[in-house]
Image (spheres, rainbow, N blue to C red):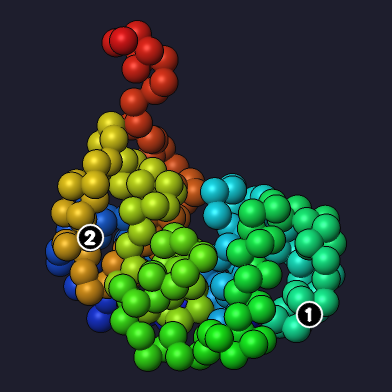
Amino acid sequence: MVDYFRYGEEELVYLKRRDKRLAEVIDKVGLVKRRVIPDLFAALVHSIVGQQISTKAHETIWARIQSGLGTITPERVIELSDEELQRFGISFRKVAYIKSAALKIAKGELDIQSLYGKTDVEVTELAGIGIWSAEMLMLFSMQRRDIFSYGDLAIQRGLRMVYHHRQVSRELFEKYRRRYSPYGSVASLYLWAVAGGAIDGMKDYAVSKKKIEFRL
């Protein structure tokens, strides 16, 4: 059975009241179905694999991992050599992160289920996986409601497209985070949809590299 990120009228009504442009996006896109991975370790591997690669590449590599490992557990990961894991299309650095997490869980040094009892900040401080991966773990496995990742390039692209920004500074990003809170995760779903081309005619207003070079 496929599981999707759960949200409903409460979140949508709140976001639409807070932001007219996002309200238009929500009405045009409709319900967004984004798959979640209930198993925390599998979701952790999924997040690490997805760092700094395209959605298409991520899906391709993830399909290979699922086919090759079947059930994705710490024990199955440990059984494989670094080279065998790399053959799925995973970089050496990511293999090291995945292996490290698997070993910590297998040895009892990391109780991954205990993450449910930790705050968002505490989860992002999980050593060895990076802030973005921790945020994706919280959103797409733990289904936390207020995850809005500055490190996610697609979310920044969505903001540029919806609000016609040339670039999104950290200060500007935090303004939107406050506006969408406590339902930043749902706002993220819609910005991802926009960035992926869900609404015809919307363009990215980012400053092109050519223009930057000309100014220099």
Instruction: Pick the quarter of the image with the C terminus.
Output: top left
Say whether disc 2 or disc 1 marks the residue closer to the N-terminus: 1
The image shows residue 179, relative to residue 14, as above or below, that is above
Checking the image for residue 76, the label placed there is: 1
Kindly identify the residue that appears in the image at 78 percent across and 80 percent down: 76
Residue 150 in the image: above or below residue 200 = below
The picture quadrant where one finds residue 192 is bottom left
Front in this rendered view, residue 110 or 49: 110
Q: Is residue 4 visible?
A: no
Q: Residue at x 20, y 55 (%)?
A: 174
Mark 2 vs mark 1, CA separation in Å: 38 Å
Q: Position of residue 163 (x, y in %)?
A: 24, 43
Frontmost residue, 132 versus 194: 132
The relative height of residue 87 versus residue 102 in the rendered view (above or below) is above
- Residue at 61% across / 64% down in the picture? 97
Residue occupying image coordinates x 15% and y 66%:
17
Secondary element under disc 2, as helix, strand or loop, is helix
What amino acid is found at the position of numbered circle 2 in the picture? Arg
